[in-house]
Image (tube, coloured by chain):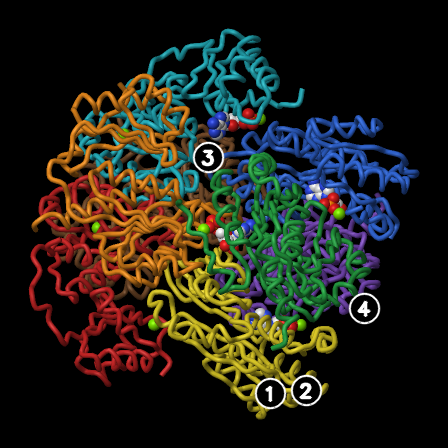
Chain colours: A red, B orange, C yellow, D green, E purple, F blue, G brown, H cyan
Amino acid sequence: GFAKVDHHRKKRQGFPEVIFGEGKTPSQILDISRAILAKNENILVTRVDKEKAEIIKKELPFFTYHEIAQLLFYKTIEETVPMKGYIAIVCAGTSDMRVAEEAALTAEAFGVEVRRFYDVGVAGIHRLLANIEEIQKATVSVVIAGMEGALPSVVGGLVSHPIIAVPTSIGYGANFQGLSALLTMLNSCASGISVVNIDNGFGGAYNAVTIHRIANQQI
Amino acid sequence: GFAKVDHHRKKRQGFPEVIFGEGKTPSQILDISRAILAKNENILVTRVDKEKAEIIKKELPFFTYHEIAQLLFYKTIEETVPMKGYIAIVCAGTSDMRVAEEAALTAEAFGVEVRRFYDVGVAGIHRLLANIEEIQKATVSVVIAGMEGALPSVVGGLVSHPIIAVPTSIGYGANFQGLSALLTMLNSCASGISVVNIDNGFGGAYNAVTIHRIANQQI
Amino acid sequence: GFAKVDHHRKKRQGFPEVIFGEGKTPSQILDISRAILAKNENILVTRVDKEKAEIIKKELPFFTYHEIAQLLFYKTIEETVPMKGYIAIVCAGTSDMRVAEEAALTAEAFGVEVRRFYDVGVAGIHRLLANIEEIQKATVSVVIAGMEGALPSVVGGLVSHPIIAVPTSIGYGANFQGLSALLTMLNSCASGISVVNIDNGFGGAYNAVTIHRIANQQI
Amino acid sequence: GFAKVDHHRKKRQGFPEVIFGEGKTPSQILDISRAILAKNENILVTRVDKEKAEIIKKELPFFTYHEIAQLLFYKTIEETVPMKGYIAIVCAGTSDMRVAEEAALTAEAFGVEVRRFYDVGVAGIHRLLANIEEIQKATVSVVIAGMEGALPSVVGGLVSHPIIAVPTSIGYGANFQGLSALLTMLNSCASGISVVNIDNGFGGAYNAVTIHRIANQQI
Amino acid sequence: GFAKVDHHRKKRQGFPEVIFGEGKTPSQILDISRAILAKNENILVTRVDKEKAEIIKKELPFFTYHEIAQLLFYKTIEETVPMKGYIAIVCAGTSDMRVAEEAALTAEAFGVEVRRFYDVGVAGIHRLLANIEEIQKATVSVVIAGMEGALPSVVGGLVSHPIIAVPTSIGYGANFQGLSALLTMLNSCASGISVVNIDNGFGGAYNAVTIHRIANQQI
Amino acid sequence: GFAKVDHHRKKRQGFPEVIFGEGKTPSQILDISRAILAKNENILVTRVDKEKAEIIKKELPFFTYHEIAQLLFYKTIEETVPMKGYIAIVCAGTSDMRVAEEAALTAEAFGVEVRRFYDVGVAGIHRLLANIEEIQKATVSVVIAGMEGALPSVVGGLVSHPIIAVPTSIGYGANFQGLSALLTMLNSCASGISVVNIDNGFGGAYNAVTIHRIANQQI
Amino acid sequence: GFAKVDHHRKKRQGFPEVIFGEGKTPSQILDISRAILAKNENILVTRVDKEKAEIIKKELPFFTYHEIAQLLFYKTIEETVPMKGYIAIVCAGTSDMRVAEEAALTAEAFGVEVRRFYDVGVAGIHRLLANIEEIQKATVSVVIAGMEGALPSVVGGLVSHPIIAVPTSIGYGANFQGLSALLTMLNSCASGISVVNIDNGFGGAYNAVTIHRIANQQI
Amino acid sequence: GFAKVDHHRKKRQGFPEVIFGEGKTPSQILDISRAILAKNENILVTRVDKEKAEIIKKELPFFTYHEIAQLLFYKTIEETVPMKGYIAIVCAGTSDMRVAEEAALTAEAFGVEVRRFYDVGVAGIHRLLANIEEIQKATVSVVIAGMEGALPSVVGGLVSHPIIAVPTSIGYGANFQGLSALLTMLNSCASGISVVNIDNGFGGAYNAVTIHRIANQQI
Ligand SMILES: Nc1ncnc2c1ncn2[C@@H]1O[C@H](COP(=O)(O)O)[C@@H](O)[C@H]1O
Ligand SMILES: Nc1ncnc2c1ncn2[C@@H]1O[C@H](COP(=O)(O)O)[C@@H](O)[C@H]1O
Ligand SMILES: Nc1ncnc2c1ncn2[C@@H]1O[C@H](COP(=O)(O)O)[C@@H](O)[C@H]1O
Ligand SMILES: Nc1ncnc2c1ncn2[C@@H]1O[C@H](COP(=O)(O)O)[C@@H](O)[C@H]1O
Ligand SMILES: [Mg+2]
Ligand SMILES: [Mg+2]
Ligand SMILES: [Mg+2]
Ligand SMILES: [Mg+2]
Ligand SMILES: [Mg+2]
Ligand SMILES: [Mg+2]
Ligand SMILES: [Mg+2]
Ligand SMILES: [Mg+2]
C-alpha cells in the first residue's frame, strides 16, 4: 500500500533496505517485512520495543528479537563467502550497552565477525590499554561513548584503522541528551575519526561493515 | 621548545603529525616544521593564510603554498608503491571550493589519486546524475556541501562505497555558520554516511585515505 | 463565553476560523464548534487525539474523525464552483504520514483535489523521479520531510510551481525534534521554497490552498 | 571551468539561474556571468558589495548596480506579455530597507510590478491600517521585519492572499541575528504565511513572483 | 524545620512570601503554610495541581483552590484602604488562560481590581481594537501570549501606561516551549514593555500590583 | 521620503518617537530628525557612534553628543511641571557603564531626576549595602549587570518598589554575549523584577520613566 | 561479566569506584556491588529511585537507602583517623534539597563532617548573613542553587575558602532545565568558584572531600 | 571616581581585587591601579592587549607586561613565608598557551610555584604518560584544553588531587567557541574535576591557589 520499499537498494548499495521501527505501527512493520520477504531477502528492523516485537512475532514467528539492542532480525540467506578479519565494538560504560549491542548485532546480521570491548572508558585508561592490541588488529572500530564522549579521541591516537564514533545520550544536565558527546567527537584532535548521529548504533555498524567489505575485496 | 611533536604517530597511525596552522604564529609553525624535517618526513600545514605562508616560505622556501586550499606542503619522500583506484571529491557549490581543495590536496599529499566533481548540488540533480557512474567507481567519496547540505544524502542513495560527509559554513541567516548542513548530514536517511566537523576538508580526506589504503591492502 | 470566535475571518480571508485542538478541553472545543455552527459554516479542528474526539462526537455526532491525521471535520456547505487542477502532497517517509494526512485532509476539507506521493525520500531518488511528471503538473506542492528534510530541495530543482515545505519532528538525536529538517528547508539552494512550522501540515495545506485558489481565479 | 551553470533551469523552472554573489570572487562572478550571457539570458547577482561591483562593472559595464539592495542586474530580454496586478512589499522599519529593496528589485527584474509599503511596523499600527486597502489588492505580499518580526502576523489577519514572510537580522541582544523574527514568523497564529531564510529578500521575491505568475495564467 | 520562611519580606517589600508549589511535597507546603499562618498573614501557593491541592485542603480546609489557575489561596486580612483603578489582563488565545488566570487571581489576591480581555490575539486585530479604550484606562496592563507572542508589541503601540509582557509555552515545533514568544517580547519595537519568565503569570501580576500601588500612593 | 515618523506617538503614549540610530545612515537620521523638529519636539537618537555623530552635528549643530552613552540629544521643550522623586540607576561593574549611562541620560532627557549607584556588584555585597537606603527611597530602580547578572535578585530582595533589570553583554565564554545575565534576570527568585533586552539601557529607562510618571500623577 | 570494575581506582585516587545508578538495571547494580564487596570496600550507589532500591535491598539487605537523596550506601570499613573541620553545604531553596542531600550524604559517606545551611537564597540576603560566620569557618563550601543560581556569587564574596558550585534544574521556562543557573555560576564575578554539572550533588561533594582531605594532610 | 575598589577583599578573601582589563579604557585601568597602589598592594590586570599595555606603562612604568598571557603585573609586597609544593599547569595543545600562561603567571603572581606540562593532549597519550608522575605529586592541577577538551577526564583518572578544568575557545565549526570543551569537562566521567569559564586561565589559577594555600596551612 503506502510504502515504496526500495528493493533496488541491494543492487545499488549491496544491502537490502533496513526498517526504522520507531514511530511505525506493528502493522506497518509487518507490511514492509512481507514485501521484503517476497524478494527473499534478510530483514532487519531497528528500534522496536518489546511490546511491539511480540505483536509482530505473533504474525511472523521466524523473527529473532534482541531485547537489549531492540532489534528484530530474520536471516533467509547466508553470506556465501565468509569475510576475513573482525570489527572492534568498543564502548565506554555499561550504560552504553543498548547502542553497543545495536551496533554489534547489526554487523553480525551483515555477516561480519565482531569483537566486543565494553566498559573501557577513559576515566580508567588502564582498562583500554589492557585491550589495545586486540583492538589494533581490527579492520575498523566502532567506538561508542556517552557523558563527555572522550573515548574515540584516545582510541584514535592508538590505532591506525578508521574509527566510526557513536555518541550516546547517556548522561544528564549539561549533557543535553548526547549533544556533549556528539560535539566532543566532531572536534576530536585525533585524525581518522568520523561520526554518526547520537545513539545511532545501526549507522555506526553499517559504515564499519561497508569499510570491512572493502578490506575483504580485491580492488 | 614548547611543542612535543608526536613523531611516534607515523608508527602508530601510518601518517606523520599534520600541523594545524590556525592560531599558531609563523615562528611556532617553523619550529614544528623543522622538528618534523629533522626526522625526514613530509610536512603538511593546514589553515595557513597567504600572509603567514609568505613569512614561512622566506625561511623554508621548499614549501609549496596552495592559496585556495590554504595549505602549505613539502614532500621529501614518495609513497613507494603507488595505490590503485581513486577517491571522489564531490562538492555542491562553487563557494565550497576552499574546503573541497583542502580535501583534494590533502589526499594527494598522502599519495592518493583524486577525481573532482564540483558544483553538482541537489538543486539541479541532473548535474550529479551526469557524473554518477564515475563517482560510483571510486573506493570512497568525500562529499562536501554548505547551505542545507543535502548532497551526501542523495549521493549516499546512489553509491555502495563509504561516504565521508563534510559540512561547510557557506550560507547565512538560519544556516548558523554550518550548523544546518552539519545536522542534515548527521540525520541522513541514507546509510553509509559518516560526518566530520564543519569545514574540515582535511579530516574528510584523512578518513577517506585511511579507507582507501585498506582497499589497497591484502587483509 | 471566554472565546471570541473570529467570524469575520471568512470575509477578510476567505476561510472560516479553524480550531487548534491541542491544549483545549473537549468542552472548550464544543463551545467554539457550536458558535461556528450557529453561523452555518464548516468546522475543522486540528490536533485532536482519539479520546478527546470520542467525547466530542458523543455531543456532536455529525463530526468525522480522521485518526491518523488527528482531525475532526464537519462540512455543512459545499464549495459551489469546483476548482480545477490539484495540489501534490509529497512526503519522504512513511513516518511522516500523520503530518502528510493532516495536510491532505485539510486541503480536501477546503474543497481542493489532492494527489498523494508518499515515501519518496531522497535516499532512493528513483522513487521520486518515477513520479515527477505528475508532480510537475500540480499547481503547487506541499513537500513534507523529517530526518534531514532534504526532499524539498530536490523537488524544488525539478518543478516550476511554488513549494510549501513542511519539516516534521520525525528523527532522533541531532534531529532535535525537527530542528534539523527546519534548518535544511530554510537554507535550501533551490528557489521557490517557503517554509512553515515543524509538523504544521495544516499550515502547509492552508498556504497551498490559498495559492491554488489564485490559480483558479481570473486576475 | 569549475562552475556547472544550470542552463537547464529556465526550462525546468521558468527562470534562469541567479548568482549568489557572497563568498565568490569578482573573477568567479565574471566567469559565470559570461556563461549565462552566452545563452542570451538576463543576469542577476545578489549580495555583491560596492567594491566588488565596481571591479565587475569594469569588465562588464552593461550591469546596473543597486547599492542599497547590493544587486547587480543586466536585462537582455524583456518579458513579452506584461503581467497584470502587483506584489506588495511591506516592511516594518527603515533599517529593513536593504532586504526590502533586494526583494523589490528582484521582483522587478523578473518583470513584475511592485508597490512598496515601508516603515509600517506594528508599534504604530495606524500606519499599516492607513495603507491596508492597497495591500489587500495585491496578488501576494512579501512582508519583511526585524526586531520581534510581528508584522506578518498582523498583515496575515487583514488580507486573504498568500504572504511570504522575510525575517531580517536587524536588532541586537536577544534578537540573535534574526532568530527572534524567524521564530515569530514560523509560529504565527495567522494562516496563509510561509517563511524564507533570515535576510533572504531574494527568496521572498522569488516565491512571490512564482505565485504572481500563477495568478496571471489560465489554469 | 528545613525552610526559613522570609517573614521579614512583608516589611521589606510590602507583600508576604508567596509559596512556589512546583516540586514541593504537600507536607512541605503544609509546613510553610502553617508558619505563615502563625504570623497571621495571607497565604498564596502557585503551581499546585488538583491532586496535591486536595491533600492540602484535607489538612487546611480554609484554602480556596482555583483549578484553572492552579492556585491555592487563603485570605486572613483584608487590605484596609481599597485601591482605585484597575489592572488590565490581556491575553491572545484561549489556550493562554491558565497563565492569564494565574495573573488575574494573584492580583485579586493582593486586593487589586482586575479587568479581563481574553482571546484578542493579533491575527484578528479588530477584537483588540474593539476593547482598546477600556484597556487604555488601566493603570498597567499584563499582556500574555504564546505562539509568536506579538500581542504586547501591538498593545504597546496603543497605550501609554507600562506593560508587563508574559510569554506562554503554548505552541509547538519552532516555538521551543515559549522561547519564540519570549524573544519576541524582549525585542519589541514598542517602548514601555518589560518581560517576565515564560508562563510566569504570578510574576506578571506581582509587577503590575507593585506599579498599581505606586499609582495609588501620594509620592 | 521613506520613513513614516510616528508623530501620533506623543499623543498615544506621552512621548515622541525615539530614533534607533544603529544601522541607519547619517542622512537617514538627519531626515527623521528634521521631520521631528518640524513638529517642535525633543529629539533623542540612541546607539550613534562618534564618527556618525560628528557628521550629523555638522548639519544640526544644536545636538549634544554623549560619547560614553552613544546618544545624541536635543531639547526644544522643557517639562513644565517638574516631577518629584528620583529613579535609581544601579550597576554592577565599571564595564557596564555604557549601558548605565544610556539609561541615566535617557531618563534625564525625559525630565526625570536620576541617582547613580555604580560598581556595586554582588561579589562585594558591602558596597551595595552601604547605599541601600538611598536606593530604597527611589520610585523605581533600573538595575544593570553583565557577567552572571545577579545584582537585580539581591536588590529585589531589599527594596519594595519595581525593578527594571537590564542585562549587559559584558563577559566572555559561557556568557554568550549577555545570554547568561538575561537568563539570570528572567529566572530571578525575587519578585517585582521585569526584564528588557540585553544592553537596552534606553528601554530600561523608558519603562522606569513611565512608572515614575504614574507615581507623580493623581489616579 | 560485562562490567570492568575499576578496583585500581582506590589506589590511584584514594576512593573506590562509585556506582552511577541511573539507566542501570537492579541486576546490573547488584553484580557491580558484589564485585566491590568481594574486595571489602564501601559501596555507594547514586541516583537510585525507591522501587529499584527495594529490589536491590531484597538481595543485599545491608544497604541503607536515603530516599530524598536517592542514594544507596553500605559501609564496611571506617576511616581510621577522623578528619578535622567540616564542609558547608549551602543551598538556596527547599526545592534544591534532593541535590543538597546527595552532596551531604556523599561527603558523610566519605567520612567527612558536614554542616547544612538550607533555604538561604539571595532574594532574602539576611538569612545568609545570619549564618555567614559558621560558613566562613568551613574548609570548603558546596553551594547549590537552581532558578537564577546567584547564591555562589554572593557566598564567594564573603568567604576565603574554595567554593564548589552546583547548579540545579529547579525552575521553569527560561531556566531551560538548569542552564540558567549553570551559566550564572560559570560567569561569576566572584573568584574562587568552580562548577560541576547540573544536579551533580555527588560531584560537588567529591570535589569538596578531595580538598578537605588536603586540608587534613601535612604537605 | 566611578569605581568602588573592593579593598576589603584582601581581608575577606586573602587576595586583593584583580582588575578585569577587557572593555576598560587605559585611563580607567590607571585610575583603579592607583587606588590599589595607594593601599600598598600588588596589582594584577588580566586581558590587556599590547597596545593598551603600552599606554598604561607610559604612566606606570613599574608594570611588567606578559604579552602571550595578556597580563600586566606589579608586585610591591612579597609573600613572607614561601609555600611548599607546586601546582601543575597541564595543557593539551600549543594553541592553548595564551590561557595556560594566564593561569601560570597568575599563580606565580600569588607566590605559588608552578610546573608546566604543555602539548600533552589525548591524541598522543604517551606524552601525558611520560609526565604523569611529576603531575601526580602536585597539590592540585589546572588542566587546560580546547577542541574536544578530553584531557581533564584522562588526567582525572590518573591523579588523586583536585583538578580545575579550563576549557579554551581553540577550535572551529562545531566547537562553537569553546562550548564543546566546556560541555566535555562538565560531563566528565572522572571524579574530582570542577570547571571554570571558557578561556578563564585566571579563574583556574585562582581556584588552584586557594586550594594550594589550604594544603600549606595547618587546619
Ligand atoms: N494545526 C495548526 N497549526 C497551526 N495553526 C493552526 C492549527 N490549527 C488551527 N490553527 C490556527 O489557529 C487559529 C485558532 O487558534 P485558537 O483561537 O487558539 O483556536 C486558527 O485561526 C487557525 O488559523
Ligand atoms: N541572496 C540569495 N539567497 C539565497 N539564495 C540565492 C541568493 N542569490 C542566489 N541564490 C540561489 O543560489 C543559487 C546559486 O548558487 P551558486 O551556484 O553558489 O551561485 C541560485 O540558483 C539561486 O537560486
Ligand atoms: N536603543 C534602543 N533599543 C531598543 N529600541 C529603541 C532604541 N532606540 C529607539 N528604540 C525604539 O525604536 C523605535 C524606532 O525604530 P525606527 O523606526 O527603526 O527608528 C522607537 O520608537 C523607539 O521606541
Ligand atoms: N580574566 C578574568 N576572568 C574572570 N574574572 C576576572 C578576570 N580578571 C579579573 N576578574 C575578576 O573580576 C573582578 C573585577 O571586575 P571589575 O570590577 O570589572 O574589574 C575581580 O574581582 C576579579 O575577581
Ligand atoms: Mg564502568
Ligand atoms: Mg552553482
Ligand atoms: Mg521508506
Ligand atoms: Mg520607524
Ligand atoms: Mg482564538
Ligand atoms: Mg569592580
Ligand atoms: Mg524559600
Ligand atoms: Mg601538538
At label 3, which amino acid type do we have?
A: Glu
Vertical side of E171 occupied by D54: above or below: above
Question: Are dots 1 and 4 in contact, CB under 8 Å?
Answer: no
Same chain? Circles 3 and 1:
no
Q: Chain of mark 1?
A: C
Q: Quadrant of ligand 7?
A: bottom left
Q: Is residue E188 visible?
A: yes
Same chain? Circles 4 and 2:
no
H135 displayed left or right of G69: left
Mark 2 highlights which residue? C37
Question: Are dots 2 and 3 in contact, CB under 8 Å?
Answer: no
**Quadrant location, the N terminus of chain C:** bottom right
Viewer-side label of 4, 3: 4
Cα separation, mark 1 vs mark 2, equals 9 Å
Q: Which label number is shown at residue G134? A: 3
Q: Chain of mark 2?
A: C
Cα separation, mark 2 vs mark 3, equals 70 Å
Q: Which label number is shown at residue C74? A: 1
Assign a secondary structure to mark 3.
helix
